Amino acid sequence: MSHPLKKISVAILSWNGRRHLETCLAALAELDDPGVDYEILVLDNGSTDGTADWLRAEILPRSPRVRLIASAANLGFCGGNNRLVAEASGDAVAFLNNDTRPQRGWLKALVQALAAAPPDVAAVSGKIIDWNGERLDFGRGVMTFDGHAFQLDFRRPLATAKVPAEGDELPFACGGNMLIRRASFLDAGGFDDDYFAYLEDVDLGWRLWSGGERITFAPDAVVHHRSSATSDLLGLYNRGFLFERNAYLTAYKNYEAGLWERIMPALLLTLVSRTQALLVENPGGATLRLDPYAGHIANTAPNGSAPPPPVPATASAQLPPAWTWNGFKVRWKGYGPADFLRRGARKLFGSSAPSEPGSVPEPPRLTDERTIAQLRGLSWLLGNLDRAAAHRQAVQARRKRSDREIFERFPLYLVPTYPGDYALFNSPGFQAWLPDDLPLVRKTLEEIMEM
């Protein structure tokens, strides 16, 4: 059954991204006729690079489709796009990242796919490729059991990457290239403002599915993407705060009653394990692994023997060689060369283990930015329990489709990602907390994406 669209609003958020907008808006000016009227809304999200003045002087006078909406403060990806939807006059909204270059047929493909879809299809997602058109950025995403998500075949060559076919169902559409019915977006609650950025599209997708709607794929709606060009402005460690907090919120709000209570222990074990793995990376952090009653106090060492050596500060010793190598690469990129070498030297020459029985270990000192980001995420969650509970109640109140039906279509993934995950996920103690009836796909990062 065809559902014609009358007007489309293209929504573009920009925070200090004038140089990206120049390319993006130029590409939009060359679009093929999508067959419907459309407008282009640009929100200057508290930029300090002169974006708004440039738009007023250079773009608006010669581009009648473009409309500027200015915010003095950065509303985040979620709040900013919610503001754009509130301003939109179209009956469907196309979300587009500012650091993209849409192909000429991009909007036409999205419009045709959504217009021809059954009425329960709330959104269609397009394909995202790298700037040079050689590798896949987004085709299909998957959710993990704890609220995180991955882009399948991310960074793999397009010749080998697996891309969904026209009309294939997706668990969520990518927030950087999607067309959604405005009524469906608003009825589902839009993007959650509390997220600020990251995983908001995963959360929205789950809410759309549980609310009885569907999401499909439009492979011809292609945009080129400068991956992480905008998100890098947030900083690596600030992003860690958003990832961990938002993943927990996604799981907490969306798991249905009965399943949430059974999956929660495994989710919390994972969160605690990852926090501990980060804590021991700090100076003196190895002391957190010591058992004070195993030979360290009160003469409990048998026959006056020395205390046992501390457990290695990371779980890399428990991992297979390939994982250890990948962990090296992740740390090298995450810390930067200087900080990576400094940490290595500290581990080699500044051990925090006690040198002899009865000696006092170096107390932990919190210096690692990733650890601080993790603890900030936990603090936010603890400080906003009531708010999160209210959001969960609203999500569950509009449920029309069970999680069982959703996960039969889209099984959840179990992917070791952080230090310690491999050992945790393979331990009988952890696996005992996984619900037997929950479909799970076990994969490594190498199987998910190009490392």
Image (spheres, grey):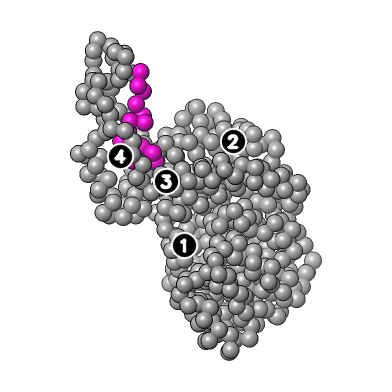
First of labels 3, 2 by sequence position: 2
Report which residue position mark 2 lands on: 264
Is 202 rendered above or below residue 356?
below
Circles 2 and 4 in contact, beta carbons < 8 Å: no
Is 129 rendered above or below residue 193?
below
Mark 3 → mark 1, Cα distance in angstroms: 19 Å
Report which residue position mark 4 lands on: 283
Report which residue position mark 3 lands on: 372
Residue range corresponding to the magenta coloring: 278-293
Asked if one can make out residue 265 in the rendered structure from this viewpoint, the answer is: yes
Circles 3 and 4 in contact, beta carbons < 8 Å: no
Asked if one can make out residue 220 in the rendered structure from this viewpoint, the answer is: no
Near-viewer residue (270 or 115): 270
User: Quick check: 29 left or right of 394?
Assistant: left
Q: Mark 2 or mark 4, which is nearer to you?
A: 4
First of labels 3, 4 by sequence position: 4
Mark 1 → mark 4, Cα distance in angstroms: 29 Å
Secondary structure, mark 3, is helix
Is 27 rendered above or below residue 431?
below
Circles 3 and 1 in contact, beta carbons < 8 Å: no
